[in-house]
Amino acid sequence: MDESTETSSGETTPDRTNRNAAWLATAVAVPVTLLVAGLAFAQLRPDDQAGSAASPSPTSARPQSSTPVDLPAPELAERPTVVCRALLSQLPPTVGGLAQRPVTAGPEQNAAYGDPALTVTCGGPAATLDETDEVWTVNRVCWHGADEADATVFTTVDREVPVQVTVPKEYDQPLQWLPAVSDTVVESVRSGGTPPSGCGG
């Protein structure tokens, strides 16, 4: 049986029934396709969120404790006191998404962020390093890193007053937490001494 009709010009066109059937099939297929795509997206989202939690980054959301962080506050000489006050007054309210927390002592020389606490201290002892030790320049500040049992401790080696950042082991890629602090160091702590040969920028 012929499923097309002939026009007056001799051309053939699809039968009206076939056109209606094609339209109906399309109307059914589109919602089904959208439903399948939606279900697939919903199944993928938990995996994406788990992957994000497994690899912390400066923008990851973290639980935030408001308990003051216990930090020492040794008495500083006059010049370090002035420099550290300037540094601490200009530190950002967050570092890599970690909100600032109160400290038990010396807010003019100590700061803390997040939980576990990433800490910034100013005016402590200078870094001791061997000629073979690595140093890293981050946003024009040269840092020496030392691994401890539960943290990586970075100390500036090119500033008149040492600044120290302690990054807990729970935070991946410890260098990524330094840029915000480095920017403040550049603005408030003058260069000083002779930096190691590995420092640049």
Image (spheres, rainbow, N blue to C red):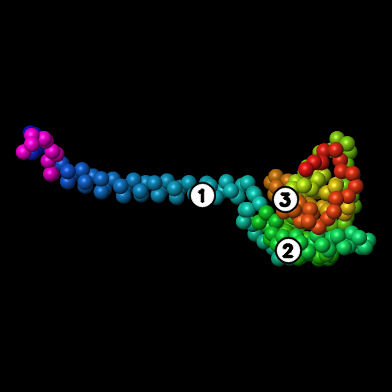
Mark 3–mark 2 Cα distance, whole angstroms, equals 19 Å
Mark 1–mark 2 Cα distance, whole angstroms, equals 31 Å
Identify the residue shown where x is 34% and y is 45%: 33
Disc 3: which residue: 179
Element type at mark 2: strand
Type of amino acid at the residue the image marks with label 3: Pro
Question: Label for residue 46?
Answer: 1
Q: Residues within 10 Å of mark 1 (few under 14, many from 20)?
A: few
Task: Give the foreground label among 3 and 2.
Answer: 3
Element type at mark 3: helix
Identify the residue shown where x is 36% and y is 49%: 35
Question: Could you tell me residue 104's position as x and y percent?
Answer: 81, 66
Mark 1 / mark 2, whichever is N-terminal: 1
Question: Label for residue 161?
Answer: none
Task: Give the foreground label among 1 and 2.
Answer: 2
Q: Residues within 10 Å of mark 2 (few under 14, many from 20)?
A: many
Horizontal side of 124 relative to 172 (left or right) equals right
Question: Could you tell me residue 50's position as x and y percent?
Answer: 56, 48
Up-down: is 4 above or below 52?
above
Disc 2: which residue: 101
Type of amino acid at the residue the image marks with label 1: Pro
Type of amino acid at the residue the image marks with label 2: Arg
Asked if residue 15 is among those painted magenta in the image, a careful observer would answer: yes
Q: Which residues are magenta?
A: 8-17
Identify the residue shown where x is 60% and y is 50%: 53
Up-down: is 2 above or below 112?
above
Asked if residue 111 is among those painted magenta in the image, a careful observer would answer: no
